[in-house]
Structure formats: structure tokens, C-alpha cells
Image (tube, rainbow, N blue to C red):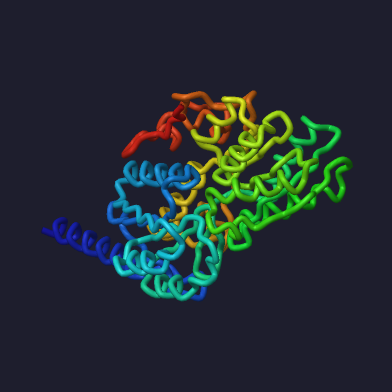
């Protein structure tokens, strides 16, 4: 009997200690209510993304879906299509009160501060993916955009040692593209032979995808000496490429992009004027973002804690991409992970995230 009482007392003490451990919520780590901590099998994620025609949006969305399927998390993608719809669709996502909301690249992001405040006030974690950071955003996963632009320019200098006369696309409403544009523009200041002819905001055309064609066409007419168009994003770069071809200047003007994906790589393989792109590891961005959600909203860690992928509130989770040319261009059927080197020397590591094939499966390069 005494033994039974002792066992019951011990069990009761264990339950009391366990209840106490979970009763104390982790402390808030910024000026908002701390995002909710939930069981791993209770996580729900909404990913807000625009224009699922662009591979810079298709690829990270695919990987977030793979990640959530592998982890057993509920996943929903909200494609808000154009910036005019962002506020409505973001409010819809907030009203569903998921565990976390991931926001893809968004123009004029700071104009939506009230929505971020609302979400964080409800205990929702807010994460950026290839986007900006404003108050309330826990972290952003992306690349060093200055480093990206310089990598492209350095490759151009290697291939064209005498320099180039070039024009640059920028996007004032899109901070990541503006950073790239600024670095490309400044390259002419201290690299002999590189001459910046003009810079234009692609938003002035009214269409971010086809605007590259319009601006490139005008540059070809204005600058007979034009030798290079620095696109800073693949959609305008591809449309600029079409303008070059139509003008019959395939052998005179080279075009560069940023992002990478099947469409862009097809242009490069086919010998078009689009000769270079900086291929971004969007899949790695997606993985790091999901790891951040797990660390903060399942494990209960705070930014800066040991074992937390986020080192500070509003921190950047940085991954490097690769300059893609005809020499290293991916082939149809290749796994997206074969393009990059983030797996080091063990691409077949058992259960490594880049082997996960759940949900929609690993993105494969197409024709």
C-alpha cells in the first residue's frame, strides 16, 4: 500500500511539474505579444505570395508546401495576384488566425504596418521570405542583394575585360531590386571601361513583367552604343531580351537577370541575349523560414537563444546563390537542389531537408 501511495505521489508531482513548465509562457522578445507556442502537429501556416507566374514566387511556394507536408503542418497559399489586392488578402489571412504568416516579396511593405501590428497583436508570427523587414516581422530569409549585383558585374568584367556601356532597371517600390540596382550603377565609378548610360524605374511602364521590353526598346533607340542591360530580376530581363532580338542586336547587347528558374535557364541554354542570371536558392530561404517558425513557435525559443536560427528580432537569414551562365546552366530534369552547393559534400544525406519530396515534391527543371 505504501508503495502504491508513493507511486501515486510521484506521478502527481510529475504532473504538477509538467503543468508548471507549460503554464509559464516564454517571454515576449519585442514590442508585441509573443507569437503563440503550439504543438508541432498543430502548426498552421499561410503563405502570401503575388503572381504565381514568376518562378521567383513559384519556387519558394513549392518548397514551403514541401516543408509543411513533411513536418505535418497545415498549409495554405494565398495568391493575391497584384499589389492592389494585398491588403484585402492579408486581412483575410489574419482573420483565420494561423500560427504563422509568411509574406513573399511585397512592394511598399511599410505601408502595411497596421496589418502587421494587427497580426502580431493576435499572437500570429510574421515572417518575410525574400522581402523586407518592418516592425513586427520576426525575420527575413533571402540573400545579400549587393553581393548578388556585384557578382553579376564581376562576371561581366571577367568576360568583357574592356568594359561595357550599360543601362540598369531599378524598382523604387521594391527595396531588394533597388539595392541591386544601386550596386550595379555604382560599379562604373571605379571600374575602368564600364560606363553607365541610364537607369530607369521599371514601375514607370505600368507593368513589371513586360516593362523590360518597353524600356529596352527605348534604350536601343536612344543609345546606339548600348552593350548591356542589367535587369536585376528575371521577368523584365526576359522581356528586355525579346526587345534586343527584335532589334536584330543579339550579337551586340547582352542582358542579365536575377532569380533563376526553368524559363530563364531555357533562354540561357538557347543562346539568347540573356546570358547571365544570379540564381537564388529560394528553396533554402523557405527551409530557413520554416525552421524559424519551428524554433520560435514550437520549440519556444526566442531570437538569440542557443539553437534558434534567428539571431535577433528582425534579423536576416542569408544564403548565397550562384551566377548561372551557359557553362553551368541546369538541364531539363535536374533537381533544383543540384544547382546549388548548400548541402556541402553530402547531397544524399539521409533525411536532409533537400531530400524531402513530400507534398508537391522537389522542383525539377523543365524545358
* Rendered position, 362 above or below 65: above
* In this picture, residue 332 sits left or right of residue 267: left
* Rendered position, 56 above or below 84: above
* In this picture, residue 68 sits left or right of residue 313: left
* In this picture, residue 21 sits left or right of residue 194: left
Tally of numbered tags: 0
Q: Residue at the location (80% across, 49% down)?
A: 196
Q: Residue at the location (41% across, 75% down)?
A: 118
- Which quadrant would the N terminus be assigned to in this image? bottom left
* Rendered position, 38 above or below 365: below
On the image, the x and y values in percent for residue 270 come to: 57, 25
Q: Nearer the viewer, residue 123 or 257?
A: 257
Q: Residue at the location (39% across, 35% down)?
A: 356
Q: Nearer the viewer, residue 109 or 216?
A: 216
On the image, the x and y values in percent for residue 140 come to: 54, 56
- On the question of residue 79 being in view, the answer is yes
Q: State which quadrant residue 299 falls in.
A: bottom left
On the image, the x and y values in percent for residue 66 come to: 37, 41
Q: Residue furthest left?
A: 1
- On the question of residue 306 being in view, the answer is no
Q: Nearer the viewer, residue 361 or 366?
A: 366
On the image, the x and y values in percent for residue 187 come to: 80, 48
Amino acid at each position: 500500500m505504501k508503495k502504491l501511495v508513493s507511486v501515486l505521489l510521484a506521478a502527481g508531482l510529475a504532473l504538477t511539474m509538467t503543468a508548471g513548465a507549460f503554464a509559464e509562457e516564454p517571454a515576449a522578445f519585442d514590442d508585441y505579444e509573443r507569437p503563440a507556442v503550439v504543438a508541432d502537429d498543430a502548426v498552421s501556416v499561410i503563405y502570401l505570395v503575388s503572381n504565381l507566374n514568376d518562378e521567383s514566387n513559384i519556387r519558394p511556394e513549392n518548397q514551403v508546401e514541401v516543408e509543411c507536408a513533411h513536418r505535418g503542418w497545415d498549409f495554405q497559399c494565398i495568391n493575391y495576384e497584384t499589389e492592389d489586392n494585398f491588403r484585402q488578402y492579408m486581412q483575410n489571412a489574419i482573420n483565420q488566425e494561423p500560427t504563422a504568416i509568411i509574406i513573399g516579396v511585397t512592394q511598399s511593405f511599410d505601408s502595411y504596418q497596421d496589418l502587421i501590428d494587427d497580426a502580431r497583436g493576435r499572437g500570429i508570427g510574421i515572417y518575410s521570405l525574400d522581402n523586407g523587414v518592418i516592425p513586427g516581422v520576426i525575420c527575413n530569409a533571402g540573400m545579400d542583394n549587393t553581393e548578388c549585383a556585384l557578382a553579376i558585374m564581376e562576371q561581366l568584367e571577367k568576360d568583357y575585360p574592356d568594359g561595357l556601356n550599360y543601362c540598369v532597371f531599378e524598382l523604387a517600390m521594391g527595396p531588394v531590386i533597388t539595392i541591386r540596382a544601386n550596386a550595379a550603377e555604382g560599379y562604373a565609378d571605379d571600374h575602368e571601361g564600364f560606363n553607365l548610360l541610364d537607369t530607369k524605374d521599371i514601375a514607370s511602364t505600368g507593368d513589371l513583367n513586360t516593362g523590360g521590353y518597353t524600356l529596352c526598346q527605348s534604350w536601343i533607340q536612344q543609345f546606339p552604343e548600348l552593350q548591356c542591360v542589367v535587369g536585376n530580376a528575371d521577368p523584365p530581363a526576359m522581356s528586355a531580351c525579346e526587345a534586343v532580338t527584335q532589334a536584330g542586336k543579339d550579337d551586340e547587347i547582352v542582358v542579365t537577370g536575377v532569380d533563376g528558374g526553368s524559363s530563364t535557364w531555357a533562354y540561357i541554354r538557347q543562346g539568347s541575349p540573356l546570358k547571365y542570371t544570379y540564381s537564388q536558392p529560394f528553396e533554402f530561404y523557405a527551409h530557413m523560414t520554416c525552421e524559424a517558425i519551428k524554433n520560435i513557435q514550437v520549440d519556444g525559443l526566442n531570437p538569440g537563444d542557443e539553437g534558434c536560427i534567428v539571431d535577433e528580432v528582425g534579423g536576416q537569414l542569408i544564403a548565397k546563390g550562384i551566377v548561372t551562365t551557359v557553362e553551368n546552366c541546369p538541364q531539363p530534369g535536374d533537381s533544383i537542389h543540384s544547382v546549388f552547393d548548400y548541402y556541402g559534400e553530402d547531397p544524399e544525406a539521409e533525411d536532409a531537408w533537400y531530400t524531402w519530396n513530400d507534398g508537391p515534391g522537389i522542383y525539377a527543371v523543365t524545358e
